Amino acid sequence: LQIPTLDQIPQLTRQVTNKPITSPFEMISYVAHEKRQLIPGIKEEMEEVVAAGDHNYGNTGRSNKKQWVGMTETALDRAGIFNLLTHVFYTPDGVKTAVSKAAAIRELLTRYRKVTHHEEDPRTAVFIACIFPDVDVVLVEYSSTGRLYSSHEVDRFPNIKRSARIRR
């Protein structure tokens, strides 16, 4: 994924859409995401953020289609963390996940002086760190994805911190 400049990140409209899931790939992805479990330690971290008077936002690559949003919010509620989120940014149809996340971070930077982004995908972490050098990016190495990615690539960015656990 080519890294754009901040000016090249589009302004996104994020309304939930009624478009159905149509492709087999998206259906497989939906089923896989439906089975995902909460990352250990995230609820406690989110509670600490709220207790400190700060805000948690969800910034996900999951689609803004009604079926995806419903599944995601049900899972967040079942995990006991939906109420700890101020808002969840979903990814509009046709927009790459990293671009959607960057657009959300840009929006948050208009409201907050300091933004920290937690990310499981090292490619997206590098994308975000490159565009936003003043945003702390925590690469959560919960799955094998984070551990398999080149340390050299990630270590080029002083604003990326590796963590086996969610931590600000």
Image (tube, rainbow, N blue to C red):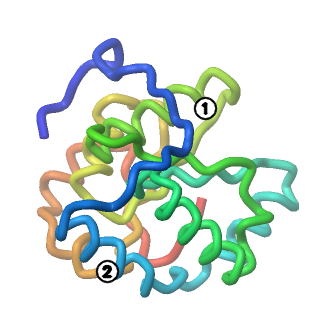
Separation of marks 2 and 1 at Cα, in angstroms: 27 Å
Q: Residue at x 63, y 67 (%)?
A: 73
Q: Is residue 64 above or below residue 36?
A: above
Furthest residue to the top? 7
Q: Residue at x 60, y 59 (%)?
A: 168
Q: Position of residue 41 (x, y in %)?
A: 61, 81
Q: Amino acid at mark 2?
A: Ser
Q: Is residue 162 left or right of residue 166?
A: left
Q: Position of residue 155 (x, y in %)?
A: 23, 52
User: Which image quadrant: the N terminus?
Assistant: top left
Q: Position of residue 157 (x, y in %)?
A: 28, 43
Q: Amino acid at mark 1?
A: Leu
Q: Earlier in the sequence, mark 2 or mark 1?
A: 1
Residue assigned mark 1? 108
Q: Nearer the viewer, residue 58 or 124?
A: 58
Q: Which label number is shown at residue 143?
A: 2
Crowding near pointer 1: few (<14 within 10 Å), some, many (20+)? some
Q: Secondary structure at mark 2?
A: loop
Q: Is residue 123 left or right of residue 119?
A: left
